[in-house]
């Protein structure tokens, strides 16, 4: 399996679904860290991707996100209460 392919492919629109796996990620106008930020996506958000090229995901809604910040699997949120006690 090519690492730039995704098992969550949507053949009707030739899109792949990914999830944001960081707190937030910048959506950029072009595939470069020096490109203007035009939006943000947030942890756990599912996004449709048209293509991945040179480690940048081109979003169906427009813009680009670093592929390293996305996952084919929905991230799991683990929350701990500050008052939790661990007895070992």
Image (cartoon, rainbow, N blue to C red):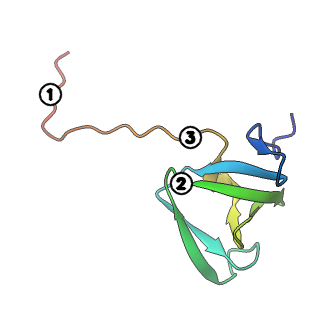
Front residue of 14/59: it is 14
- Quadrant hosting residue 2: top right
Q: Residue at x 37, y 37 (%)?
A: 78
Q: Residues within 10 Å of mark 1 (few under 14, many from 20)?
A: few
* Mark closest to the chain's N terminus, 1 or 2: 2
Point out which mark residue 85 bears. Answer: 1
Residue at 81 percent across and 57 percent down: it is 52
**Rendered view: 33 above or below 71:** below
Label number found at residue 45: 2
Q: Is residue 10 left or right of residue 75?
A: right
Residue 15 locus on image (x, y percent): 79, 53
Q: Please report the residue visible at 62 percent of the width from the left and 38 percent of the height from the top.
A: 73
**Spatial separation of the CA atoms under disc 1 and disc 3:** 28 Å
Identify the disc placed on residue 74.
3
Front label number (1 vs 2): 2
Label whose residue precedes the other's in the sequence (1 or 3) = 3
Dot 2 lies on which element? Answer: loop
Farthest residue, direction front: 12
């Amino acid at each position: 399996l090519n690492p730039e392919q995704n098992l969550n492919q949507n053949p009707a629109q030739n899109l792949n679904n990914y999830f944001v796996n960081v707190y937030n990620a910048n959506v950029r106008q072009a595939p470069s860290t020096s490109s203007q930020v035009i939006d943000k996506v947030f942890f756990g958000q599912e996004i449709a991707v048209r293509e991945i090229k040179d480690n940048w995901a081109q979003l169906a809604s427009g813009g680009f996100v670093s592929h390293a910040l996305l996952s084919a699997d929905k991230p799991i949120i683990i929350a701990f209460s500050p008052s939790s006690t661990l007895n070992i």
